[in-house]
Image: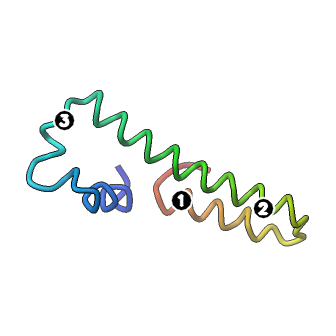
């Protein structure tokens, strides 16, 4: 798991005081996948914005890639 994703889970209280270890593997994987899907959806929205403004420099697309990489998700 990416350090940024782990930090977000900690902020949500899921990794504090053994909470994460108390969850079964299926639940842990589900939470991780849910977080990845939210990040991917946000990145996708940035790509959509780039298409809407018909940007020549693909600023939003580049931002989208940076968001994915920041959270350890392959673009």
**Label of residue 26 in the image:** none
Disc 1 to disc 2, how far (Cα)?
19 Å
Residue at horizontal 53 percent and vertical 53 percent from the top = 39
Q: Which residue is mark 1?
A: 69
Badge 2: how crowded within 10 Å, few (<14), some, or many (20+)? some
Q: Residue furthest front?
A: 12
Which residue carries the number 3 mark?
Answer: 23
The quadrant holding residue 7 is bottom left
The picture places residue 10, in percent across and down from the top left corner, at 25, 59
The percent coordinates of residue 29 (x first, y second) are: 34, 34
Q: Which residue is situated farthest in the left direction here? A: 17
Is label 3 in a helix, a strand or a loop? loop
From mark 1 to mark 3, how far is it between C-alphas? Answer: 27 Å
Q: Could you tell me which residue is drawn at 52 percent across and 49 percent down?
A: 38
Q: Residue at x 15, y 56 (%)?
A: 16
- First reached walking from the N terminus: tag 2 or tag 3: 3
Q: CA distance from mark 2 to mark 3?
A: 38 Å
Quadrant of res 54: bottom right
- Looking at the image, residue 16 sits to the left or right of residue 10; the answer is left
Q: Residue 13 location in percent, x, y? A: 22, 56
Q: Which residue is mark 2?
A: 49
Q: Is residue 73 above or below residue 63?
A: above
């Amino acid at each position: 798991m990416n350090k940024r994703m782990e930090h977000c889970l900690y902020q949500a209280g899921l990794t504090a005081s053994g909470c994460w270890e108390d969850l079964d593997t299926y639940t842990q994987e589900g939470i991780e996948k849910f977080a990845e899907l939210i990040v991917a959806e946000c990145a996708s929205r940035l790509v959509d914005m780039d298409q809407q403004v018909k940007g020549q420099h693909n600023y939003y697309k580049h931002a989208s890639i940076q968001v994915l990489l920041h959270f350890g998700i392959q673009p």
